Structures are given as C-alpha cells and as structure tokens.
Image: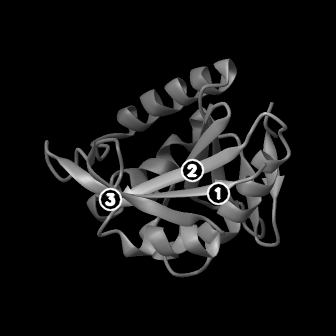
C-alpha cells in the first residue's frame, strides 16, 4: 500500500531491518532525552530493539503500522524513524530522531516526504499527529510540514518515560481531501 522506500534531497526513508537494531539502540532508542516524549519505554538493551523490529515487521505486513528508517543518502547512516498508522480515512504520523541530528531539518524533510506519500492514497482524507504540550520542537516540525493546531486534549496519553499519569497533548492535522 505505501512505498517501501522514499528518497528526498538528503534522505533515504526505507523499511527498517533486524540488522538495524544496534544502530537504533545506540543512536536513539536507549537515550532518555530522545525517548522522553515517546509512547514506548527507553530501551535498556539491544534485545528490546530487536523485539521492536520484529513487531514492526509484523505490523507492516498486516498494514497496521508502516515505519521507515531515516537514513542520510550520502553515508547510509541511520538517524531515526518515522511511521504512519492507517485508520482510514485517517492516518496518524509519529517520529523519532537521534539527538545529535536535532535542529538540522532532517525530520521536517522526512515528514514532508511521508505526507506526500500518504496524500497519494485516495482513501486518506486526514493526516494527524499529536505531541506533548511542552514539546515545542515537535510542534514546530509539524507546523513547518503544514499541519494545523486543532487544539489541546487534556490528559490525552501516557508517556512512560515521564511517569504513569497521562499528559496533555497538542493535536495537529492536515486535511488532504
């Protein structure tokens, strides 16, 4: 349904592979600063990352979650991941990026490319995303990619790396049809 890989000026977005586990673990999945605003716990070992990749492969196969590893084209180095969860007519997007690549425009570039891919599907009417209200960097990425703030949902989701209580979220969307 969605492309296996997407190329941009600087990036190659491709399906993650089990052999990416070491890079994912060391680049971002084990970094508490990176995982602070994510819906999954910080990985404590490469085995956690391998389990995630095995699950991601299953979810890709059944079409319920499509992830792309974010790699730079010039050196092939993996820097993060971006994914979509189809729930037609909606598609939810989420992403993560290694801390040393923050502020370089890579996520905005990747998000633009994924939005363009998602827009190609006639059964998608809305692309949406959410982020913690205090995650200004993520909100800015969404805004630069053309998402509009629809509002704030109180006690919307649990971020396990922050604790057990739900946090407020900014809800963003883009209407494509």
The image shows residue 126 at horizontal and vertical percentages of: 66, 46
Residue behind mark 3: 31
At 52% from the left and 32% from the top, the residue drawn is 53
Q: Secondary structure at mark 1?
A: strand
Q: Is residue 8 left or right of residue 36?
A: right
Report, in whole angstroms, how far the alpha carbon at label 3 lies from the one at label 1.
Answer: 30 Å
- Is residue 158 in view from this perspective? no
Mark closer to the chain start, 2 or 3: 3
Tell me whether circle 2 and circle 1 mark residues in contact (CB < 8 Å).
yes
Mark closer to the chain start, 2 or 1: 2
Q: Secondary structure at mark 3?
A: loop
Q: Residue furthest left?
A: 164
Residue behind mark 1: 174
Mark closer to the chain start, 3 or 1: 3
At 68% from the left and 62% from the top, the residue drawn is 110
The N terminus lies in quadrant: top right
Residue behind mark 2: 128
- Is residue 37 in view from this perspective? yes
At 43% from the left and 27% from the top, the residue drawn is 51
């Amino acid at each position: 349904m969605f492309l296996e890989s997407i190329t941009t000026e600087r990036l190659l977005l491709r399906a993650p592979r089990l052999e990416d586990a070491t890079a994912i673990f060391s680049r971002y999945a084990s970094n508490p600063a990176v995982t602070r605003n994510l819906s999954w716990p910080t990985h404590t070992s490469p085995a956690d990352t391998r389990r995630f990749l095995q699950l991601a492969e299953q979810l890709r196969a059944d079409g319920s979650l499509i992830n792309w590893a974010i790699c730079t084209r010039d050196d092939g180095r993996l820097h993060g991941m971006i994914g979509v969860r189809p729930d037609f007519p909606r598609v939810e997007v989420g992403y993560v990026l290694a801390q040393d690549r923050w502020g370089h425009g890579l996520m905005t570039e990747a998000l633009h490319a994924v939005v363009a891919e998602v827009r190609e599907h006639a059964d998608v009417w809305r692309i949406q995303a959410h982020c913690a209200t205090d995650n200004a960097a993520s909100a800015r990425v969404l805004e630069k990619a053309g998402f509009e703030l629809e509002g704030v949902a109180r006690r919307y989701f649990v971020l396990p790396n922050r604790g057990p209580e739900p946090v407020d979220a900014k809800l963003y969307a883009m209407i494509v049809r």
